[in-house]
Image (cartoon, rainbow, N blue to C red):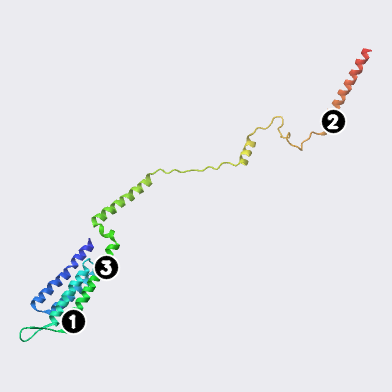
């Protein structure tokens, strides 16, 4: 919006130049018309440079317009003269100068027009939307971003905690600690391959076996004696 206002105010400068050029021609001041034309286009360029406004779309047409005005002023001022009998004589120097200026003015204007067309074709999306449409699109994008942020803030978060399974060695150690002791083997010596009873224990059992054998023999002798 501010850029459009700058460009609109800037158009007053070339418009005033055109009006001054016409007034100077009517008054017959051809040199003044040339100065007004040159000053009008130069002041307009300086205004755009100072205000940092964008180059308008009609830049090529404006250059051609002021080129035609300048060539007309030069032709009327230096390319034609009035003789003693009221007629007009053409001066070759002034006529050629006006033609050269007209040629370069038209060439420069056409170059600016082509550049504007290339810029429009390369950026079609920038000119397709107006200022109101751009504001509407930007507001819609901001609303979508805000809704996404609120959804992310309100969504429940699930925290997964992975528990490590105890190793087999730890399980075996726990089982050994929990298992009760054997009342008949409180010292857990039954499965010990290095455990053995004292030698006295074995001697007692051997003596008992000998006494049993002796008793059996004695009973057999008594039985035989009775039968006799």
Extreme residue in the left direction: 85
Classify residue 82 as left or right of residue 55.
left
**Which residue carries the number 2 mark?**
203
Instruction: Determine contact: label 3, label 2, CB under 8 Å.
Output: no
Pick the front one: 18 or 211: 18
Pick the front one: 161 or 187: 161
Q: Is residue 49 visible?
A: no
Location of the N terminus (image quadrant)? bottom left
- Of circles 3 and 2, the one toward us is 3
Task: Give x and y (percent) for residue 169.
Answer: 63, 41
Q: Is residue 176 above or below residue 102?
A: above
Q: Real-space Cα distance between discs 3 and 1?
A: 29 Å
Task: Give x and y (percent) for residue 120.
Answer: 27, 63
Extreme residue in the bottom direction: 84
Q: Real-space Cα distance between discs 1 and 2?
A: 153 Å
**Which residue carries the number 3 mark?**
115
Classify residue 147 as left or right of residue 73.
right
Q: Which mark is residue 133?
A: none
- Of circles 3 and 1, the one toward us is 1
Q: Earlier in the sequence, mark 3 or mark 1?
A: 1
**Which residue carries the number 1 mark?**
96
Location of the C terminus (image quadrant)? top right
- Of circles 1 and 2, the one toward us is 1
Instruction: State the residue at coordinates (83%, 33%).
Output: 199
What is the secondary structure assignment of the residue under circle 2?
helix
Q: Is residue 184 above or below residue 145?
A: above
């Amino acid at each position: 919006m501010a850029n459009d206002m700058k460009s609109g105010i800037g158009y007053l400068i070339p418009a005033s130049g055109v009006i001054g050029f016409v007034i100077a021609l009517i008054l017959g001041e051809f040199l003044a018309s040339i100065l007004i034309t040159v000053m009008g286009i130069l002041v307009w360029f300086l205004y755009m440079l100072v205000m940092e406004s964008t180059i308008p779309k009609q830049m090529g047409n404006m250059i051609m317009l002021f080129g035609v005005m300048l060539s007309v002023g030069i032709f009327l001022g230096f390319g034609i003269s009035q003789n003693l009998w009221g007629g007009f004589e053409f001066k070759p120097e002034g006529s050629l100068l006006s033609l050269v200026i007209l040629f370069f003015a038209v060439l420069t204007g056409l170059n600016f027009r082509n550049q504007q067309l290339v810029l429009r074709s390369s950026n079609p999306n920038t000119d397709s939307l107006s200022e109101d449409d751009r504001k509407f699109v930007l507001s819609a994008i901001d609303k979508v971003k805000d809704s996404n942020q609120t959804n992310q803030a309100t969504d429940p978060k699930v925290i997964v905690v992975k528990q490590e399974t105890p190793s087999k060695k730890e399980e075996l150690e726990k089982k050994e600690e929990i298992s009760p002791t054997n009342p008949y083997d409180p010292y857990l010596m039954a499965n010990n391959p290095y455990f053995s009873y004292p030698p006295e224990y074995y001697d007692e059992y051997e003596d008992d076996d000998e006494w049993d054998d002796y008793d059996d023999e004695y009973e057999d002798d008594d039985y035989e004696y009775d039968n006799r």
